[in-house]
Image (cartoon, rainbow, N blue to C red):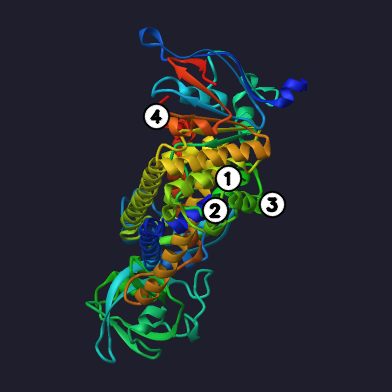
Amino acid sequence: MFLAVRDLRFAKGRFLLMGAVVALVAVLAVILTGLATGLTTDNISALRAMPVTHLAFQQDVQGELFSRSIIEQPTWQRWATQPGVQAATPYGNSLTHATDQRGGKNLDIALFGVQPGAFIAPKPASGQPLGATPDGILISAKLAEQGVRVGDTLVVERAGTHLHVLGTLEEASFGHVAVAYAPLRLWQQVHYGLPSQPPPAAWRQATAVALKLTPGTDAADLKALDAQLGTHTVSKRGAYAAAPGYSAETGTMTLIRVFLYLISTLVVGAFFMVWTVQRKPEIALIKALGGSSRWLLGDAVTQVLVVLVAATGAGIGVGLALGAGLTGTAPFAIEPGPIALAAVLLVALGTLGTLAAVRRITTVDPLIALGGNR
Amino acid sequence: MTTLTAIQTGLRLDGVTLLLGDGDSQVTALDHIDLAVRRGELLAIAGPSGSGKSSLLAVAGGLIRPTTGRVEIGGTDLTALPDRRRTAFRHAHIGYVFQSANLLPALTALEQLLLVPKLAGRITPGHRDHARQLLAAAGMQHRADRRPHQLSGGERQRVAIARALLLEPDVLLADEPTSALDHHRAREIVALLAQQAHQRTTAAVVVTHDPGVLDLADRVVSMQDGRLQQVQ
């Protein structure tokens, strides 16, 4: 610490420059982390909020499970009677367009169909509960922000089905589209997609079976049940990947962040490598004065930690301030967990990069201090 | 072993030979050197470049292990110590003054001295007092808070001498401390070394190729091709 802080003060310019680079990386890390969190929320917040443990889809459906899977009534009824199943209920998922009759605004809606009173039926934040009227729906906060009000009537395009807004819900999105909950029968009508009455078969269909299983249910048991009931069961987390664009988005964001951390590690490592090489005569002198390599390494690591912690802290502060400005205009959300992880990663990886660089302190020969003519 | 000679002799070299390089390019840097420096004595080693003066200092200071022979400081055989103990021993018993540019740019004159106890642990108020006394003895009390770039070459060497003396070493080794100084300053620096050696009963060795300062030493030996010759 003795020498480390005095070096920092003496070579202010260089360390400020280095600190600025780390701070900018930290700003970027906060923005990217916020975007990743925001994109995830925008994509699967409605799924995440559902009190299910698993979803059982139609067997042998590839890719877009939520839009392709069809489950029949006997299947969800049989699921409900299986051992280890605490609750099983049909769940419908349909992306649709509707027009608000008041004002004529066009809206994208992810319509979730549930049986009123089922364990996955949400409680309204305001207004009446689901099932109060056969054509009543609950809208998520995002639709309310787009100007839809309780009492409005939304008309589904093509089918012409009328959806009457009964109440509102917390923020809930699926595939970047605002969610509305409808009674299963109304959902079936919308999902059928034509103005006429649907055929009898349509009234017995849903997208998947929403399941609440006893904790610790065996994967082998699930497989056996799937085989028996003709379904394909995935965990709630596993179902995220089936949400439109989810895997591509999280994959891209993760890749960008991995590269950011890699670059930051190398930049910090390279800086301290040059710094160490430049200080070689001083290091030799301290060794000749009886300083051990351990003392020198301790001093160097202290110096790195001071720079990294200060710069990362400053960068995260700026990043959070910028992020606050972004919220609302972009899918951006700040959660303490991921931000703290980013901070820890920046400091830890920077230190790691530096350790690799300052290892050469141990190989500096104190004889250099004695000078040439031996 | 604490015989009378061991107490009075600060530094003793017995049959020290140092071979550098190997095979055909092997050079005998030091050739059977026997040398004893008493406490309170300033010994000057003169000789041309490449005669082995700096090698002698490196061996005497425990920076290089001799090929054969013994190096004793205050009765301890330096050549028998394992590396880590040798570093700690050097720190506690040997003071070094190097050619030039041997101060750390970020530290003030006072801090240059305080770094020495810091290397082994904590700085005590005693260290601070002692550091100020030594700077005063070197005529540097009014420059204690200056950094090296604000000091002249002579002033820097004064700070380096004060630093070398901070832990009251048994042996003070100075490697061409006047090479960057004019004649007047060079004499001042060597006089300071002699005065401090006498006053603190430290065995001091100064290596120099400057004949103008030799009269300030208590004893002069000269080196030629790795061998010592008595001069006075």
User: Which mark identifies residue B162?
Assistant: 1
Q: Is residue A1 visible?
A: no
Mark 3 vs mark 2: which is more N-terminal?
A: 3
Q: Nearer the viewer, mark 3 or mark 1?
A: 1
Question: Left of B139 or right of it: where is A357?
Answer: left
Q: Is residue A151 above or below residue A257?
A: below
Single out the residue that lies furthest toward the top. B24
Q: Mark 4 highlights which residue?
A: A372
Amino acid type of the residue tagged 2 in the rendering = Met
Q: Nearer the viewer, mark 4 or mark 3?
A: 4
How far is mark 3 from mark 1, CA to CA?
Answer: 17 Å
Q: Is residue A111 above or below residue A296?
A: below
Q: Nearer the viewer, mark 3 or mark 2?
A: 2
Q: Nearer the viewer, mark 4 or mark 2?
A: 2
How far is mark 1 from mark 2, CA to CA?
Answer: 9 Å
Q: Are marks 4 and 3 in contact (CB under 8 Å)?
A: no
Amino acid type of the residue tagged 3 in the rendering = Thr
Expressed as whole percent of the image width and height from the top left, the position of residue B199 reads 67, 40
Q: Mark 2 highlights which residue?
A: B140
| Same subunit: marks 3 and 2 | yes
